C-alpha cells in the first residue's frame, strides 16, 4: 500500500486571522508596515520599530503577526492590491487586458521600490493570487495550451525589469555611455545602443525605462501571439 505524505506550510495566509485586540487591527499593521518600508526600506523593518510607529507594545503586535516574515508577506501582498484588475474584452481579446495587468503590476512595484528586493518570497496572498488567476484565465481563454508557461514569461519579465531598474537607476547617473564609447572597437554594438539608461527630461526622469519596458513587452506579446497560432 502506497502512503502519501502532505507537507503543510505554515504562513500568515494559512493561519486563521485573529480578532482585533484593543484598537489595533491587521489592516492598520499592514498600512503602517508599508509606510515604514516606503520611508526606510526593508533593512530598517523590525517588529520593535513597527510597534513603536503603531504606538503599541510588541506583545499586542505579536497577537496579529508571528514574525517579521509575516509582515513582509502582508506588505508585499498589499502592493499587489494596488494593481487594478483590467476589464475583460467581450470579444475575447487577450493583448489589451494582459498588457494592462503587466504594466499595472510594474507601476505598483516601482511605487514601492523595496518590494523588488523581496520578490523571491512565495506570492500566496489573496491579492497576488487573484491577479495571477486573472492572468491564467485570460491566457487559457485565448487558447494557450500551457498558460503557466506564458504567464511565467510575463511575470519573469516584469519582475526582472523592476529589479534591474530599482538596482541600477541610481548607479545609472554615472555616464556608462562614455565608458563604452571609449571602447567602441571592442564593444561596437554596446557603444552604439547603450547598456544602461540615461535620465530623461526633468519632468519624467525615467522615461527611457518606461519606453524600453513597453517595447520589450510588445516583442514578448507578439511572440506569444505567433506561438499561440501554431
Image: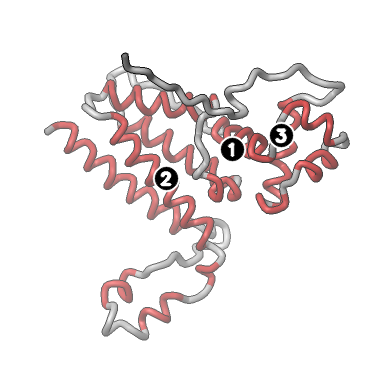
Q: Quadrant of residue 151?
A: top left
Query: 45 or 93: nearer the eye?
Result: 45
Q: Earlier in the sequence, mark 3 or mark 2?
A: 3
Horizontal side of 191 relative to 40 (left or right) equals left
Q: CA distance from mark 1 to mark 3?
A: 11 Å
Answer above or below: position of 207 versus 10.
Answer: below
Q: Quadrant of residue 226?
A: top left
Quick one: label 3, few (<14), some, or many (20+) residues within 10 Å? few
Quick one: label 2, few (<14), some, or many (20+) residues within 10 Å? many
Horizontal side of 28 relative to 218 (left or right) equals right
State the colouring used for the structure image: secondary structure
Query: 195 or 55: nearer the eye?
Result: 55
Query: 99 or 11: nearer the eye?
Result: 11
Circle 1 — which element? helix
**Disc ID at residue 76:** 1
The residue singled out by tag 2 in the image is 158
**Disc ID at residue 94:** none
Query: 195 or 100: nearer the eye?
Result: 195
Circle 3 — which element? helix
Q: CA distance from mark 1 to mark 2?
A: 15 Å
* Residue that extends furthest to the top in the rendered view of this protein: 1
At which x and y percent is residue 144?
23, 28
Question: Depth-wise, is mark 1 or mark 3 nearer the camera?
Answer: 1
Q: Give the residue displayed 85% in from the left and 23% down from the top.
A: 23
The residue singled out by tag 3 in the image is 31
Horizontal side of 141 relative to 114 (left or right) equals left
Answer above or below: position of 161 versus 73.
Answer: below
Circle 2 — which element? helix
Tell me whether the residue at label 1 lies in contact with that at label 3, contact meaning CB atoms closer than 8 angstroms: no
Q: Earlier in the sequence, mark 1 or mark 3?
A: 3
Tell me whether the residue at label 3 lies in contact with that at label 2, contact meaning CB atoms closer than 8 angstroms: no
Q: Quadrant of the C terminus?
A: top left
Amino acid at each position: 500500500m502506497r502512503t502519501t505524505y502532505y507537507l503543510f506550510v505554515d504562513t500568515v495566509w494559512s493561519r486563521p486571522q485573529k480578532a482585533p485586540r484593543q484598537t489595533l487591527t491587521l489592516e492598520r499593521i499592514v498600512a503602517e508596515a508599508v509606510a515604514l518600508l516606503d520611508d526606510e526600506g526593508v533593512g530598517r523593518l523590525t517588529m520593535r520599530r513597527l510597534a513603536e510607529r503603531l504606538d503599541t507594545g510588541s506583545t499586542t503586535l505579536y497577537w496579529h503577526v508571528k514574525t517579521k516574515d509575516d509582515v513582509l508577506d502582508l506588505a508585499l501582498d498589499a502592493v499587489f492590491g494596488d494593481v487594478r484588475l483590467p476589464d475583460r474584452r467581450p470579444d475575447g481579446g487577450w493583448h489589451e487586458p494582459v498588457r494592462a495587468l503587466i504594466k499595472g503590476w510594474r507601476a505598483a512595484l516601482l511605487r514601492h521600490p523595496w518590494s523588488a528586493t523581496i520578490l523571491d518570497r512565495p506570492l500566496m496572498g489573496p491579492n497576488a493570487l487573484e491577479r495571477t488567476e486573472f492572468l491564467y484565465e485570460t491566457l487559457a481563454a485565448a487558447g494557450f495550451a500551457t498558460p503557466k508557461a506564458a504567464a511565467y514569461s510575463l511575470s519573469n519579465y516584469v519582475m526582472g525589469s523592476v529589479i534591474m531598474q530599482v538596482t541600477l537607476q541610481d548607479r545609472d547617473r554615472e555616464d556608462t555611455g562614455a565608458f563604452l564609447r571609449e571602447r567602441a572597437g571592442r564593444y561596437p554594438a554596446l557603444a552604439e545602443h547603450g547598456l544602461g539608461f540615461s535620465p530623461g527630461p526633468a519632468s519624467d526622469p525615467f522615461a527611457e525605462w518606461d519606453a524600453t519596458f513597453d517595447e520589450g513587452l510588445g516583442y514578448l506579446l507578439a511572440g506569444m501571439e505567433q506561438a499561440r497560432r501554431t
